[in-house]
Image (cartoon, rainbow, N blue to C red):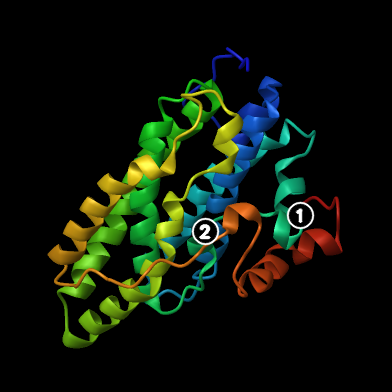
Amino acid sequence: MSHSKHVVSTAITAETIAESHLVAPEAVALYALGLGDDALILAQRLGEWIAHAPELEEDVALGNIGLDQLGHARSFLTYAGTAWNKSEDDLAYFRTESEFRNRHIFEQPNGDFAVTIARQFFVSLYFDRLYRALKESTDPTLAAIAAKATKEVDYHLDHSVQWLLRLGLGTTVSHEKMQRAVDAIWPFVGELFSPEAALRDLDDGVGVRPELLRESFEEDARRRILDAGLKVPTAPFARGGGRDGIHTEVFGHLLAEMQVLARAHPGATW
């Protein structure tokens, strides 16, 4: 498979991808689609905290993290869409539930603040490992998106770790809530490292095999959980299936809210 040698700035955005007139090979597009869907659905969940966070500073912090994730999603989806002549909006707003490829952890409800922090801790640690590896991709566009995303994920991970420590080592109530939250999110962690079917048709070096990230992730996750005075969960991992278009029952509600305006007024601009 041949790949474009077009040089893309490390400050890549959806707009620069669109303006560069790159066309992703379909196998690359399918891989980018899954990554874009993960970031998009997480951004939607984080956006639900706007004006509902426990303090004003967290309202801003979670909103900014959500916007970063939306930026990652826009870049991946714009690149994926070049293979099928579809825009980022086409892919975000006009696909059905079974056409989305995000893994289940990203669509889980926010729950209370501790649950959101637990989810954010696990996914930020995963993104940290993923994007650092993806920066070395032989596909220059994927590498550029990852290089930009890595810098932002550094902050996301630090933010969630600080709250993990603060709640885990805080009061009896905060400790209990943080432990319940870590236990609740843990079953969805395993799917992050299930093999990517989209990689089967890619040349070596284009994508990142998630199973190779697992050992480093689990070692770091366990250490940080213990540092927060919490117990590492032992519950089995859930089956998953997000990359195959199989989702949990909460996903349909999330998608309906995310897509309702675009579907009610297709083509509208403001």
Q: Residues within 10 Å of mark 1 (few under 14, many from 20)?
A: few
- Residue at image location 86% in from the left, 55% down from the top: 266
Q: Residues within 10 Å of mark 2 (few under 14, many from 20)?
A: many
Q: How far apart are marks 1 and 2 (CA)?
A: 17 Å
| Drawn side of residue 222 relative to residue 97, left or right | left
Q: What residue type is labelled 1?
A: Arg
- Above or below — where is 147 with respect to 35? above
Across the whole image, how many numbered discs are drawn on residues? Answer: 2
Residue nearer the viewer, 208 or 95:
208
- Residue at image location 67% in from the left, 54% down from the top: 100
| Drawn side of residue 30 relative to residue 221, left or right | right
Q: What residue type is labelled 2?
A: Leu
Q: Is mark 1 on a helix, strand or loop?
A: loop
Q: Is mark 2 on a helix, strand or loop?
A: helix
Q: Residue 149 at what x, y percent from top left?
A: 44, 39
Q: Mark 1 points at which residue?
A: 95
| Drawn side of residue 243 relative to residue 234, left or right | right
Residue sitting at the far bottom = 173
Which circle marks residue 42 in the picture?
A: 2
